Image (cartoon, helix red, strand yellow):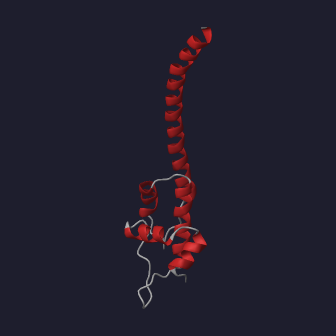
């Protein structure tokens, strides 16, 4: 069992983020001891590590919520590979959109450069 400070150090995310994740129901309510302090078990730690991983990959809180909210963490394994494949597809779509913006910009810049170079 871990305190919030220990969990924060172990996972390398601020305790305030952990509290926020609990407040917005991204993670299930954390068990409390007699003093009402949060106590984290290994399952809680693993879920927080997964959330940290997804956030570092640029996944939004809503996407993370969507992917883990339907899981009963006590009975089901989290299929991280399927979640990552889905996120990769979203990122590839975003890349395509950004590349089209870059192409548009290039089309507007290149004629201007050519006109200037000719003078």
- Residue 40: x and y, percent? 51, 79
Residue 34 x, y percent position in the rendering:
42, 91
Residue 42 in view, yes or no: no
- At a point 55% along the width and 49% down the height, the residue shown is 85
Residue 50 is left or right of residue 37, and the answer is right
Q: Residue at x 50, y 78 (%)?
A: 4
Quadrant of res 31: bottom left
What x and y, as percent, mark residue 18? Answer: 47, 70
Q: Nearer the viewer, residue 20 or 80?
A: 20
**Picture coordinates of residue 104, whole percent (x, y):** 50, 24
Foreground residue, 116 or 83?
116
48 w.r.t. 40: above or below: above
Note whether 109 is above or below 63 in the view shown: above
Q: Is residue 61 left or right of residue 119?
A: left
Q: Quadrant of the N terminus?
A: bottom right
Q: Nearer the viewer, residue 111 or 75?
A: 111
Screen quadrant of the C terminus: top right
């Amino acid at each position: 069992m871990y305190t919030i400070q220990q969990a924060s150090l172990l996972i390398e995310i601020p305790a305030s983020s952990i509290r926020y994740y609990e407040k917005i129901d991204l993670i299930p309510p954390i068990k409390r001891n007699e003093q009402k302090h949060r106590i984290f078990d290994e399952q809680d730690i693993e879920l927080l590590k997964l959330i940290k991983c997804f956030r570092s990959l640029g996944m939004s809180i809503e996407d993370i919520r969507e992917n883990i909210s339907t899981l009963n963490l006590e009975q089901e394994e989290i299929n991280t590979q399927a979640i990552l494949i889905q996120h990769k597809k979203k990122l590839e779509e975003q890349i395509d959109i950004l590349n089209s913006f870059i192409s548009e910009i290039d089309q507007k810049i290149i004629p201007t450069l050519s006109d200037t170079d000719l003078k």
